Image: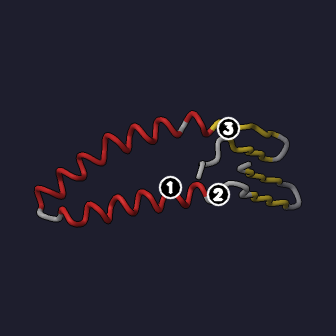
Amino acid sequence: MIPPMVMWFKVQWFGIWIPLFLLWPIVIVLLLLVMPLVFIGMAITGNISRFWIAIRIVLAAYKTICATRGLRIDIDKEEMTFEIYLP
């Protein structure tokens, strides 16, 4: 499963491609920095068994992000157009 790599964002007449593939390395680094702190915090409080629940939540969030590939949101009103597309 691969998350979306680019996003087409358009409001009215202005449209732009947003490169999400530049965001994913930052997210991974932040996750790798935060998860050991979460593990240490749960070990100190005695809730070490809940660490696996935290890992499952992270994996479920990743699967949800991967499932957004192909998402298309089009809103057309009288004077306003809004579009998001994740190819």
Which badge, 1 or 2, comes first in the chain's sequence?
A: 1
Residue underneath mark 2: 68
Q: Report the amino acid beneath label 2.
A: Thr
Q: Label 2, secondary structure: give it.
A: loop
Drawn side of residue 55 relative to residue 72, left or right: left
Q: Residue, x 52% and y 40% (percent of image)?
A: 24
Against 39, is 8 above or below? above
Say which of marks 3 and 2 sits in front.
Answer: 2
Residue lying furthest top in this view?
A: 22
* Residue contact between numbered discs 1 and 2, judged by CB atoms under 8 Å: no
Which badge, 3 or 1, comes first in the chain's sequence?
A: 3
Residue underneath mark 1: 62
Q: Residue, x 62% and y 59% (percent of image)?
A: 67
Residue underneath mark 3: 18
Q: Residue, x 60% and y 49% (percent of image)?
A: 3
Residue 18 sits in quarter: top right
Drawn side of residue 28 relative to residue 49, left or right: right
Q: CA distance from mark 1 to mark 2?
A: 10 Å
Q: CA distance from mark 3 to mark 1?
A: 19 Å
Q: Label 3, secondary structure: give it.
A: strand
Q: Report the amino acid beneath label 1.
A: Tyr
